[in-house]
Image (cartoon, helix red, strand yellow):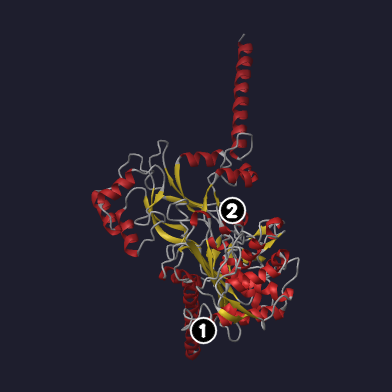
Amino acid sequence: MSRNWTIRTFHVLLFIAILFGIEGARLAWLQLGFGGSRTASGSLNQSAFLQHSDGLVLDSGRGQFLDRKGRLLTGVTVQSLAAFPANGKPRGSNQDLRLLASSLGVEENALEAWLAGLREPHTWNGADSDRALNMTKLQINAAERSRLLGVAVVPFVNRYSADFPPIHAVGYISQHPERVQQLYGNRLTKHRMSLKSPVGGSGLEKSMDRLLQGRGPTTVMQMTDANRHPLEGLGLRISAPKNPHFPIQVTTTLDLDIQRIAQNAMDKYGISKGAAVVLDATNADILAMVSLPRLDPYHIGASEADERNHALVAAPPGSVFKTVTLAAAIEAGVTSFDETFYCDGHYGKYGLKCWKEGGHGKLTLEQAYAQSCNVVFAGLAERMDAAWLQITAERMGFGRQVGWQTDSFIDGKPLRLLGEEEKGSIFLNKQTAQDGGVRTGTGIGQRDVRVTPLQVANVAVTLLHNGQVFSPRLVKEVRYADGGLMASINVKSAPSKYGQIEPQTARLIREGMRAVVREGTAEHALRNAKWPLAGKSGTAELSGKQKARNDQWFVGYGPADGEARYAVAVLIEDQPAGLRNRGATLFGEIMNGLRLQEQRLLSQAEAQKEKR
């Protein structure tokens, strides 16, 4: 009996030991990150840590953008005040709270209410409710002296700088769970992203999003107990992905100094809607791209902001398009610069008339271009077949997307840097194009013609290069965080399937653009320019609900003597009809700013040379 009882006892203990062994092995298996019930963090150990901590993302790990001189356009690190939920525990003394509030320049009760209302970690944004406040040394010192529970100074990365207006060409990021699911389902499955991960909403942020995603965020954690009460003395823990290659750095062609020159010029003249594009005349690199209304990356859809990049939106060009009509007429052989015309102010049909009351009288083709005579250019358009106008426009870079793109980037996928670029139009269809009224309207840049400010600026570069159309770049190269080169984006042309205009044609048009400034529609506005300039003005009558409203254009380059360095296009949208075209004035202001900038740089270089 005793022996049987001993055997039974042994079997029971053995069974219990086996059960403990199985459960222990199972727990170890899960803690190592295996098994079907794996958590998002990869292990039970990490899951337990997350259940007893509050995390604040200091840096999403997203790639950054720089201007062509290496200055940050995104990802500005600031020393910021961060606060974690106290969950009922006292923060500290009233004296400490008063000390911190005083340094921040806010009322004590306002700071106390903010701290009490926290349900998740957050940074103190101060008067700028969109960006974490960059604290001064005195504020940092006060925060450290206050020793408030759950309050600390941390290095936080603001995506967009407060030092200059957000740039449409760079774009914005936002949370968009549907797009994350659509684009990055594989990363979600592997727990490398969450549905809350930010993705690009426009500009380069969107077109290069797949390269910018990085390898995970840098997070600061505050340890808490099971009741989520902060554990005093444990401090904060910062975790960051250990990968020297990320985040990547994208060097753009933008120049912050030139961007400011264009922005300040538009502000000076009170432009509220429009665009300005500055291209490098040597290769069509985009040096500046300003769009109004301004972009507010923190309040997309706000009434006084606009996320659309107006530099890439097609609009009626008015007389700027006479450049295409002139090129088409010369190459079709239906006119020459020796021909003379007579304008009495009326075309005689289609209800078309010249902008100048009483007409221009007798004038040459060059004078007709310089004075922007509607009667002459309507007649030239009617002399040609509509298909030839369409072909010439495409040869010069209109009616199609010209921004830099490739069918296969380094990851084997297509890449179009200017994803929002509209191609515009010349004629809506072949049938209506044969109508004389449509053709004459097209010849003066009205009817169905739509072009973008980028395309208009690029035409100036095309003329400077005797008809060669470049593909404007917005990015020069992409590098890893450790400086290694990921990819170069080389200058490339954007030829038309119809070829290009002749060098002689480009030369004649450049002469016409000089005449515009010397004795034409821009003579008064550019009389005192700091550089010799050339260009073409345009006023487009808006139809539909915008009757009695105009768009004002100017495109040109400078210096016009010697080697040109800049090509600029400006568009002032939705102006009252009858208001003097300020496009040439705005163009001149930007060009003067560029000239002064070059003089400053030259003076600085000479001063440094003397020091050596």
Q: Comparing marks 2 and 1, which lies closer to the viewer? A: 1
Q: Quadrant of residue 404?
A: bottom right
As shown in the figure, which amino acid type bears the numbered disc 2? Arg
SS for callout 1: loop
Quick one: 372 or 531, which is closer to the camera? 372
- Across and down, in percent, residue 4 comes to 64, 11
Against 72, is 208 above or below?
above
- Across and down, in percent, residue 501 comes to 72, 74
Q: Quadrant of residue 317?
A: bottom right
Mark 1: give few (<14), some (14-19) or many (20+) Cα within 10 Å.
Answer: some
Pointer 2 residue: 215
Q: Is residue 251 visible?
A: no
- Residue positioned 55% across, 38% down in the render: 44
- Residue positioned 49% across, 57% down in the render: 546
As shown in the figure, which amino acid type bears the numbered disc 1? Trp
Mark 2: give few (<14), some (14-19) or many (20+) Cα within 10 Å.
Answer: some
The residue furthest left is 95
SS for callout 2: loop
Quick one: 579 or 270, which is closer to the camera? 579
Pointer 1 residue: 531
